[in-house]
Image: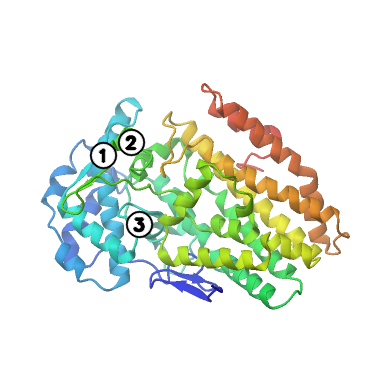
Amino acid sequence: MPLLSNYSDGFFNVGADCGFLPLKAPLETLPERYQALQVILDAMPVVIEGNKNGLLHTPDAIVAPVLALPNFIDIVSAETDVFVIQALFRSYGFLTSAYLLEPSFQQFRKDGSYGKARNFLPANIAQPFCKVAEKLQVFPWLDYHYAYSLGNYRKLNADGDLNWENVTMCNRFSGQPDEVGFIMLHVDINRFSAGLVGTVMQTIQQLQQTDATVSSLLAKNWQTMKQMNLRRKEMWKASRWQHYNDFRIFIMGVKGNEALFGEGVTYEKVWDEPKAFRGQTGAQDDIIPMQDIFSGVIFYYPENELTKYLLDLRLYRPKCIQSFFIDLEGSVKALHPKGLMGKLVDNKDITGLCYLLGILEEIYHFRNGHWQFVQKYIMANTKYATATGGTPITSWIPNQILSVISQMEDVIKALHTLPVAEDEQALILFRKNDETLPTKKGLIEGQLELVRKNNFSAEAVFALNEKFGYNDQHD
């Protein structure tokens, strides 16, 4: 299947115009007919407007309002506007996670352990939530796209851009600035995704038609990734790592978290047996998965359980994005058995290969930065060793970092067999990565050696970033 110019479900429109962001800003609040639901959502955060206590502050305070909520299944079933459907999915997703995980949150506040969650979702939430999930063709659990992040922002200054300091959350759990900064930074990074998607589509289309160099497109892709990485580093400022547990528990999923949910969650009057879905996670974002497919990192994924987790997370995305990934992968493999790298080598596109190496380096920085977030935001904050998406926190990201490093080694080997690049910037990229790749490899191998010890120190793992010159906070 050739690449289309865009992939749309009416809310998202993946292409060179919108990238991975919605076609337009999501609804800030629900329509008036759902006022009873909106009232609970507004009263729900642990802290409201900086000084008032919300429902989640007090143990069990959310129970009575939830049980008294009307079952809107009939009017939900009649909805056809995708922006209303998305706002309903977001709302029921937040309410479901808040209601079920509130006991876990209260236990954590008492003694620092993740307590048992509720695992029975009453019909007045379960039925309408599953209905809107069915309309969107996604799982009925809080997700990254429609619910927690990309479909959950509003501008503070209507004339401003999507800088994280100018956007806030429509719905929230903790009500604190650290939660807002944490998830709105993802929106900030994705404001550059239109250019990134555009260069990916144009590169594939050009290589399908001609063997001419695509170095200028790859240079734009690399430059956009550098810009995204600069914005990603703002996380240290946007959300203080010491405050991640103020809201982390509420974005946990059921799958992989049997310690919290047991066999799963029962959706009353929907399914007879318990269900288990993965939680909201930044690993559901689309930038790096697209770049993995485009650059060829997918050819270096090891065949192990961690890679299965990675591919499983593909299913936790809007169908239009899943379709885009499938078509992109098919197009990349049709170019050459070794994908873009193989095609560039055959075409002797030396400058293009140098920029591909630069793209891979930025994928590495993105992943290594994410790995540092894990070290500080999670490993230094809690002994609960499962990520919100249900994956093991100490081995999940390193699995992908090693894949990127392996491809970088092969690109460097290929470049050593070809004439020197004439493009000065491309040549600098090659020489720098040729020199620094061993330190990247030494860093991840040293960290993995530490985390394999049951009594490892998160600070010791993080300290290696400083030692090897890759501290994301100031490199």
Asked if 127 appears above or below 473 in the picture, the reply is below
Tally the numbered discs: 3
**Residues under numbered marks 1 and 3 in contact, where contact means CB atoms less than 8 Å apart:** no
Front label number (3 vs 2): 2
Tag 1: residue type? Glu
Residue 251: x, y in percent?
36, 45
On screen, residue 149 above or below 309: below
Q: Position of residue 119 (x, y in %)?
A: 23, 41
Q: Position of residue 332 (x, y in %)?
A: 62, 65
Report the residue marked by disc 1: 102
Mark 2, Cα crowd under 10 Å, few <14 / some 14-19 / many 20+, is some
Q: Type of residue at label 2?
A: Glu
Measure the alpha-carbon separation of dots 3 and 2. 23 Å
Find the residue positioned furthest to the bottom: 209
Look at mark 2 in the image and give the residue it sits on: 258
Marked residue nearer the N-terminal end (3 or 2): 3
Of the residues shown, which amino acid type is indicated by label 3? Ala
Dot 3 corresponds to which residue? 147
Looking at the figure, which quarter contains the N terminus? Answer: bottom right
